[in-house]
Image: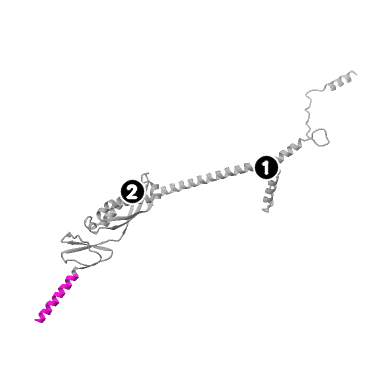
């Protein structure tokens, strides 16, 4: 009798151990458990830790609650200003309602991926090239709103969307490089022209100052000679100011001291016909 009781106890213990082994489940900290009993969703979501289900009746499905980083494959499209580009992005999302993520959509990861690709193509068609290159924050917000609207019904919340890279054709890259080079050259010419204008104003002021004091021009000439001679050149080019030549020209026309006439003597033109005196002398000689 005792042996039968011991055997029955051992059998019950074995059956209990098998039952506990089949019914025991462990849910991790970053997971939530959704239980289906005979195909029907149980309203209570199992939290992290040890939990029990009815073997053969209940089915536990674990849902990851961590933020998922999903790269969006590069999408090729034509912008609003008719430029062909390839744009890829990355989506950060997480599950906020495990039951809806399991019941409302077959595979929420695949659904979010397809929605992100479709929204990215739509954003490319509505935007211009300059917006894709320099105004990405606004495009990221619009893309996040487009993906988040249907994803809320799936129990998924879009945390962040970012455009990673924009690939341009080689011809467009060369055109943009030429445009940037031309713009920089234009700004360089404007700066040089402005510098020339300021320099001309300063030179005009210096010319007025030298006109009031002619000795300043001679001093400036000597400074130029000193600057050139400081370089230890074997050949020295000495510039002569035009004012000095004019001064010499005026001096040539001034009368010499002690004489009654100018140094510059004008030559009289030769007579056009024979002189009357010479003709008279010839006639007198013939008469004699």
Which residue is at the far right? Answer: 288
Write down the region rendered in magenta.
Answer: 1-21
Query: Please, what secondary structure does the residue beneath circle 1 have?
Result: helix
Question: What kind of secondary structure does the magenta stretch mostly adopt?
Answer: helix
Seen in the image, is 255 located left or right of residue 44?
Answer: right
At 17% from the left edge and 64% from the top edge, which residue is drawn? 58
Packing grade of label 1 (10 A; few <14, some 14-19, many >=20) is some
Which is more N-terminal, label 2 or label 1? Answer: 2
At 33% from the left edge and 51% from the top edge, which residue is drawn? 143
Query: Please, what secondary structure does the residue beneath circle 2 have?
Result: helix
Seen in the image, is 14 located left or right of residue 255?
Answer: left
The residue singled out by tag 1 in the image is: 210
Seen in the image, is 134 located left or right of residue 46?
Answer: right
Q: In the rendered image, which quarter contains the N terminus?
A: bottom left
Applied colour scheme: one colour
**187 or 21, which is in the foreground?**
21
**15 or 233, which is in the foreground?**
15
Packing grade of label 2 (10 A; few <14, some 14-19, many >=20) is many
Which residue is at the far top? Answer: 287
Residue 123 badge: 2
Seen in the image, is 232 located left or right of residue 179?
Answer: right
Give how far across and how far down residue 16 sits, in percent: 16, 72
| Image quarter of residue 45 | bottom left
Residue 68 badge: none
**For residue 155: magenta?**
no
At 12% from the left edge and 78% from the top edge, which residue is drawn? 7
**60 or 168, which is in the foreground?**
60
Give how far across and how far down residue 215 sits, in percent: 71, 44
């Amino acid at each position: 009798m005792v042996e039968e009781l011991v055997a029955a106890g051992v059998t019950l213990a074995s059956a209990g151990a098998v039952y506990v082994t089949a019914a025991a489940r462990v849910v991790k900290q970053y997971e939530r458990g959704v239980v289906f009993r005979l195909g029907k969703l149980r309203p209570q979501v199992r939290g992290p830790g040890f939990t029990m289900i009815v073997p053969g009746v209940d089915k536990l499905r674990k849902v990851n609650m961590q933020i998922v980083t999903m790269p969006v494959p590069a999408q090729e499209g034509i912008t609003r200003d008719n430029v062909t580009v390839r744009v890829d992005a990355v989506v950060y999302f997480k599950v906020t309602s495990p039951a809806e993520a399991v019941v409302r959509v077959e595979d929420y990861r695949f659904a979010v991926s397809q929605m992100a690709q479709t929204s990215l193509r739509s954003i490319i068609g509505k935007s211009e090239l300059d917006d894709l290159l320099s105004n990405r924050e606004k495009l990221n917000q619009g893309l996040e709103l487009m993906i988040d609207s249907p994803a809320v019904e799936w129990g998924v919340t879009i945390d962040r969307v970012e455009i990673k890279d924009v690939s341009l054709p080689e011809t467009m890259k060369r055109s943009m490089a030429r445009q940037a080079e031309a713009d920089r050259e234009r700004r360089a010419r404007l700066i040089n022209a402005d510098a020339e204008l300021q320099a001309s104003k300063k030179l005009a002021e210096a010319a007025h100052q030298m006109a009031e004091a002619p000795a300043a021009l001679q001093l400036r000439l000597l400074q130029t000679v000193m600057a050139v001679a400081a370089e230890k050149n074997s050949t020295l080019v000495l510039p002569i100011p035009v004012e000095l030549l004019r001064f010499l020209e005026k001096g040539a026309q001034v009368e010499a001291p002690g004489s009654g006439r100018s140094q510059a003597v004008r030559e009289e033109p030769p007579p056009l016909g024979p002189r009357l005196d010479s003709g008279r002398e010839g006639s007198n000689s013939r008469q004699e």
